[in-house]
Amino acid sequence: MSWRERLLPQPVISLLIVFLWLVVVSRFTLGSLVMGTIVGLLVPLLVRNFWVDRPVMHRPLLALGLFARVLGDIVVANVEVARLVLGPPGRLRPAFLELPLEISSPYVATILASIVSLTPGTVSIDIDMDRRLVLIHALNAPDPEAAVATIKRRYEAPLKEIFGC
Amino acid sequence: MLPSALDILVSLLLLVGGGFALVGSIGLARLPDFMMRLHGPTKATTLGVGAIVVAAMVHTSATSGRLSLQELAISLFLFITAPVVAHLLSKAALAQKARDGDG
């Protein structure tokens, strides 16, 4: 392990933390830059034992597209779920979905599970990398198979392409 | 003084955000079981807080005359933490259900 890996295990994350620190402080001074750099160096060192291997992004542009799609879906699903919540609760068809994973990296599977949780109407409950599936609870899924197919098509397929795994 | 078109935009965003936060809370109160209730807060944190944050951003940027990004950090932190919380809560609920035999 080189000195760089020992002192700076996650250079990108460190830079992001420095940037975020400056944004939150929202005043660019030498003091805030020094403080942000200290935090940016310390945090990755403190959490290094929890870190899983991160695969390289092959298609960064596609990642931007996926980000836009997720934001759009959050808006659409919010309206949809608001209607379900305000309507008669007896009409809801909640279901547990088992989504078989094609993704092999735990890191990418976590991104997929987080997207599922952020879009209203579905929450990820468990990622089981041994059985290679994500357990999802859906607020209203009259057709569980179709719901699983939609998640696979809209989110898993692009993630697979972005990270090439 | 704010130009009035800006006032209207900011007010609309606040109303949308407040509305979704309200619907999220109503869901929390009236959905029948734990798993379904879990869906309420996810909504409130995404579009609810999201719209309020954008409203704050537009307002501060317009009044101070420079782009204000602080508010986006709030959204970012919520987007990172909300799925983790939902995941832990539902996992705990499943474990408890398995222990007690039924829901």
Image: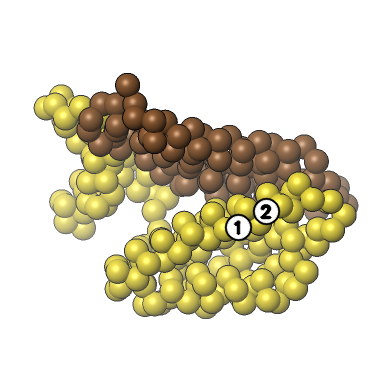
User: Residue under circle 2?
Assistant: A81
- Do we see residue A145 in this rendering? yes
Please state the horizontal and vertical placement of residue B70, each as a whole percent of the image: 33, 34
Quick check: do tags 1 and 2 share a chain?
A: yes
The residue at 53%/45% (across/down) is B47
Image side of residue A51 versus residue A144, left or right = left
Q: How is the image coloured?
A: by chain
How far across and down, in percent of the image, does residue A135 sit? 66, 64
Say above or below: B85 vs A76. above
* Badge 2 element: helix
Mark yes or no: residue B56 visible: no
Residue pictured at 37% horizontal, 44% vertical: A47
Q: Residue furthest left?
A: A30
Q: Is residue B101 above or below residue A140?
A: above
Q: Chain in yellow?
A: A
The residue carrying mark 1 is: A77
The reply, left or right, for residue A92 in relation to residue A162 is: right
Q: Nearer the viewer, residue B3 or A128?
A: B3
Badge 1 element: helix
Chain of the residue displaying label 1: A
Given the image, on which type of amino acid does mark 2 rest? Val
- Residue A30 image-quadrant placement: top left
Q: Are marks 1 and 2 in contact (CB under 8 Å)?
A: yes
Residue depicted at x 52% and y 72%? A154
Name the quadrant of the N terminus of chain B. Answer: top left
In the depicted view, which residue is nearer to us: B35 or B66? B66
Chain coloured brown in the rendered structure: B
